[in-house]
Image (cartoon, coloured by chain):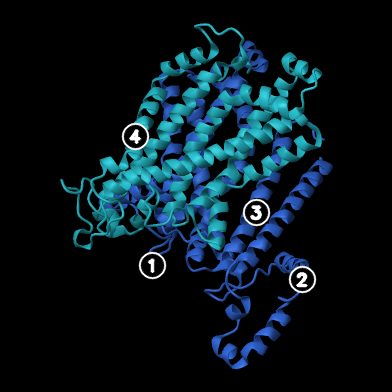
Chain colours: A blue, B cyan
Amino acid sequence: MLTYVARRLGVNVAVLLLISIGVFLLVRAAPGDPVRMMVNPEQLAAGGPDFIARKRAELGLDDPVVVRYFIWLRDALTGDLGYSFVSRRPVVAVLGERIGPTVLLMGTALLLGLLVAVPAGTLAAVRRNSAADYVSAVVGLAVISVPSFFLGIAAIYVFSLTLGWFPSSGMTTPGDGGGADVLAHLVLPAAILALSIAGPFMRYVRGGLIAELGADYIRTAEAKGAGPPRVLLRHALRNALIPLITIIMIYVPQLLAGAVALEQVFAWPGMGQLAISSIGQLDYPVVIGFALFIAVLVLLCNLAADVLYALADPRISLR
Amino acid sequence: MTTVHSPRVSRRSPARLALRRFLRNRMAVAGAVFLVLVVLLAACAPLIASHDPNAVDLAAFRRPPSGEHLLGTDSSGRDVFARLVYAGRVSLLVGLASALAAVIIGTLLGAVAGVVGGVTDTLIMRAADVVLSFPALVVVVVLAGILGPSAPMLVVVFAACNWPTACRVVRGLALGLREQEYVQASRAFGASRASIIARHIVPAVLAQVAVVGTLLVAQTILLEAVLSFLGLGVQAPQASWGNMLTDAQNLTLIRSMPWLWLPPGLAIALTVLAVNFVGDGLRDAVDPRGAR
């Protein structure tokens, strides 16, 4: 088990290094001279070309590309991703304060999505080829076909502007910010994000449950006198939900991608909104920090998916 | 799997059977009919739209729908209906081009992985795993943020992010096909791997690849829409269904001008739904064992 985890970790670190080279090359491709971005204009004007040349040497900008890559990598590993061009604060701090709202949005959406997907998928599997199964399949396809940002705009139109049930933007009302206030702001974006994963999750639950219900141990349980609810819940569903752990891990990056658009629509102060507004302001260090964050998150989720899959199902042998 | 190679071309050829199964699926047929309509509308845009989609008319901005402007005008006084029809061209083209590119790359790499095997196979499939775990949306967000947004970049990134889906399917099929007697025979006659891939593998997997490709078209149309909505895809003044909704980030406009955001939103949703229905129908028609 440990060697397996170590090997998967090794592969992921290798991939991360490859990505970091790509990101580093992007940093170089980004327009804008770092010296001019860092030093204030008066000092720059007073110093003249000599001053800029000295600063460039000080910053190591004249070193060979390979040397600069390793310096950049060392800084990145110690949590130094440079400073935001806009707020002049460390990139890590700027990103850090946005993680909380995004995790809250994604976590709520994941929970809501599962609360819908598991019962719906179970119903579709048990009543296979019934009207309910058919309807759930069509609805599942429909929710992945409607763009979530459009659903968001429509929800704002109906529930915020027309009915006035929920606030349309932000995470808190100025001057309030209590739990109930955040919850009211959370309802619309989280529900729409939940829809986008409920469809595929429902199909996975249905498929997994149908496979389990056909297995021999189900017939054994029935033969031993277990009633249908017990067979379904205690035996089949329990086993059918195991692969879902892996699928959730694989869907976390997708969920984040979905959050990017919804955060923009609902002005939710998360990482996605930060990324989009940083692009608008040409704040490259923040965009690059976002890229690295995503790369690490994706690879961690992959690793977690591999390991959890192996842990949850003893039939899988690890090599 | 080998249906395409059935030697007997009778009235009940596999292709004909697949077509019959497809036609029995009402949702798929409805989707196909709707798509034909959308493609016709987009293709004949100059004949249908009575206004220039990019003509700015500041005297007639934010007008509600009327006889003159079927779906009203936007904030620059441009005719929303004309933009909707012309935007269809861009959105469909980006979707088709990137899905096609992804499928071609994926089919070739998948066939190579399946036929050659060994280290090549491991490397290609590992790369596929890694690429597949990165959402294309996030990749475009980062690249557009640094290199600047453009429609050609969308196509390149979508193709680069989506080839693994086709690659996995084709590799799986190729592993089975490789062991078939007719492939073994042509190998014994000295056929090169390239010719085996071109003559035996690729033709045999086309049906399944078409299914993957269709579902990819749906995904890429959605992606283009989201990115253009965020301002990172197709750039104004060229209209795409996604960037027509960009203005709808303003509460006043959402409330007072539903004709601005409702039609492009519905166009995306219905088109993607139709493509998904067709893709589902194709899958069931091509591979009836996988049917529900």
Q: Position of residue B187 (x, y in %)?
A: 78, 20
Instruction: Name the element at disc 2.
Output: loop
A170 in relation to A228, above or below = below
Residue underneath mark 3? A295
Asked if both marks, 4 and 1, belong to the same chain, the answer given is: no
Residue underneath mark 1? A174
Q: Nearer the viewer, mark 2 or mark 1?
A: 2
Instruction: Spot the residue most to the right.
Output: A3
Residue type at the position of mark 3? Ala
Chain letter for mark 4: B
In the picture, the disc for residue A64 is 2
Chain letter for mark 1: A
Q: Residues within 10 Å of mark 3 (few under 14, many from 20)?
A: many
B194 in relation to A186, above or below = above
Residue type at the position of mark 1? Pro
Q: Residues within 10 Å of mark 2 (few under 14, many from 20)?
A: few
Instruction: Spot the residue most to the bottom.
Output: A46
Q: Which quadrant would the C terminus of chain A be assigned to in this image? A: top right
Instruction: Name the element at disc 3.
Output: helix
Instruction: Name the element at disc 4.
Output: helix
Residue type at the position of mark 2? Pro
**In the displayed structure, does residue A177 sit left or right of residue B81?**
right
In the picture, the disc for residue B40 is 4
For image coordinates 35% across by 52% down, the residue present is B244
- Counting the numbered discs, the total is 4
Q: Compute the Cα span from label 2 to label 4.
A: 56 Å
Tell me which label, 1 or 3, sits earlier in the chain: 1
Chain letter for mark 3: A
